[in-house]
Amino acid sequence: MLNYAVRRILGAIPTLFIIITLTFFLIRLAPGGPFDQEQTLPPEIEANLKAAYHLDKPMLVQYGYYLSNLARGDFGPSFKFKDFTVTQLIWQGFPVSMRLGLTAMLVALFVGIPLGSYAALRQNSRVDYSVMTVAMVGVAIPNFVVAPLLSLIFGIYLGWLPVAGWNDGALSHLILPVTALSLPYIAYIARLTRGSMIEVLGTNYVRTARAKGLPERTVITRHAFKAALLPVVSFLGPATARIISGSLVIEQIFGLPGIGRYFVQGALNRDYTLVMGVVIFYATLIILFNLVVDLVYAWLDPRVQYE
Amino acid sequence: MSSSLLTIEGLQVRFETADGEVSAVNGMDLDIGQGERIAVVGESGSGKSQAFLACLGLLARNGSAHGQVRWQDLNLLELSQQKLNTIRGRHIGMVFQDPMTALTPHLKVGRQLNEVLEIHRGQTGTLARQRCLEVLDQVRMPDPDKRLDQYPHELSGGMRQRVMIAMALLCEPKVLIADEPTTALDVTIQAEILALFKDLVEQQSMALVLITHDLGVVAGLCERAAVMYAGRVVEAGSVADLFTAPAHPYTAGLIGSTPKLKQAYGEPMPTIPGQPPNLSNLPVGCAFRPRCRYGIERCAERPKFKPLADGQGAACHRAGEWGGGA
């Protein structure tokens, strides 16, 4: 198992390298540059700036500089957030995004899985139909509608919770953004769980378990549940990577200092190093979480073996 | 005949499907005596498996069962799931057709066995392990000790079927229902499993219901047989009588279509003409009428099950007069 994990991590290096290369050239192919502004800079200042960041060199040379810095763990300075390195920006925002994202994902799991299982056990009943209707709505309504509505109702009209702000992640400040962020995940996980639970409940081995005279509760918890979780687990890997690397919409609406905004701001500002930094960070997370998913698979299903 | 243990009366099994209602079992009657070895024979779709799944409350979600399945003073079809759970797995064991998918993939064999003892006898730990080993030994499992700590996928098909049989035997049931227990296995393993059934039945006093489409299996193992067609028992009697003097044309057709060793090369295999009936639209009267050579006008009425000599009986207006029969 450990052997397998190490091999997978080594195997991820070429993948990361390709992602780095593609991003590097693609962002530079986009029109404009980091120092384009409404007021054009005096040419000598612009030349100095470009020279300072090696932007006056041919692209392949820049690529070489970038790679050699990267190999030393240096993501370089941000072009726009002066006096900050990309590493600093990411480590500043990441704890916020991670706290928000992990909380939202935990909420989504603890609500979505029971909801989906319950609907599956009462398939085609009124409960099932209402859960699935709500889930459909949850998947369909975008964040940027739900978040301001929540803020408006609970923050302004009722005054129960703060409208926005982080306040070092205090619980009262977490509730609204976590709710808004987790709703679509709750909905999706509930639908996934329901579908796979219904499938598993129809398998021969569940019939065998019933034929043994086990109480239905035991049939479900011992014989059906683990197998029904498999599709949820495969969804969870990339979804967790996505949710903890920050949501632009939620962080913007609730004014949270996470890294979500760097994805868009970096790209819009042509902040080359910042874009590279967040892309590499996100790609690493995805690779890591996919590995975790594969390891969890082996635990859920003994037929899966890694050699 | 010994006193009856499980009595099926007027059993109906229906499934609601997107294409309408399908009637899998249509008024099945069968009496299973203590210690009796009875074969239930029929082609695919004759309702033989569904009838017994219904007895144990194991129908798919869209299925429903009506009629009577009497066990002691109870009608199994009307029992709550809780009550039913005190009977299935304990007094009535069941072995299924496909051992490759019938065991839970993520639980060790030992767990899947000992949970039966835990629930019905309150046995756990060493005591339960001992009993599991004893039964695995009884079903001639190689290295039983090792198997308990293995997962189903580490076992061959034959071994998995032995686990299934052991599972059903753990609580010494009064009836063992085996639903095509050898169909999914290699021929050599089939023979071993059948020999095992034979020994088990001889050693123990339990009744055996063997659901099969394989007449060869029936002859060696059972004393009585019931032939099913379109969800009804169309003929029942001792295996010897059924083979030598079938009273229903369908039974005769089944026996006639068994491949024979002496069959000349190139000679076509005898078959029953026509197709099994469409279960969502059964013919009026005798369901076998469209395929029967001996049909008369009266066959448009549903034939009652007529007792003949020696416990044989058939649901055919012309039983005993069309040329076959006792």
Image (spheres, rainbow, N blue to C red):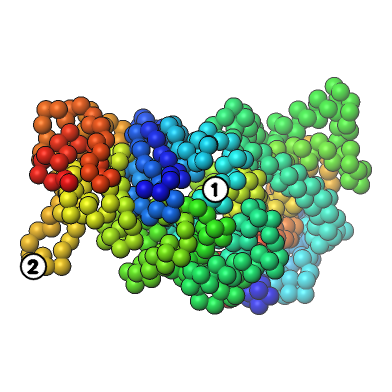
Element on which disc 2 rests: loop
Question: Is residue B54 in view from this perspective?
Answer: no
Residue B265, disc: 2
Q: Is residue A99 visible?
A: yes
Q: Say which quarter of the image contains residue B125.
A: bottom right
**Chain identifier of the residue bearing label 2 in the image:** B
Q: Which amino acid does label 2 sit on?
A: Tyr
Q: Which chain carries label 1?
A: B
Local packing at callout 1 (Cα closer than 10 Å; few below 14, some 14-19, many 20+) is: many
Q: Identify the residue at image location x=54%, y=58%.
A: B172
Instruction: Name the residue nearer the viewer: B164 or A272.
Output: B164
Residue located beneath label 1 in the image: B88
Q: Which of A278 and B174 is in front in this view?
A: B174
Task: Kindly indicate the quadrant of the structure image that contains residue A57.
Answer: bottom right
The front one of B19 and B313 is B313
Task: Give the residue displayed 17% in from the left and 39% down from the top.
Answer: B319
1 or 2: tag closer to the N-terminus:
1
Q: Residue at x 42, y 64 (%)?
A: B202
Residue occupying the far top of the picture = A157
Q: Give the residue type that dot 1 points to.
A: Arg
The picture places residue A154, in percent across and down from the top left corner, at 83, 27
Q: Is mark 1 on a helix, strand or loop?
A: loop
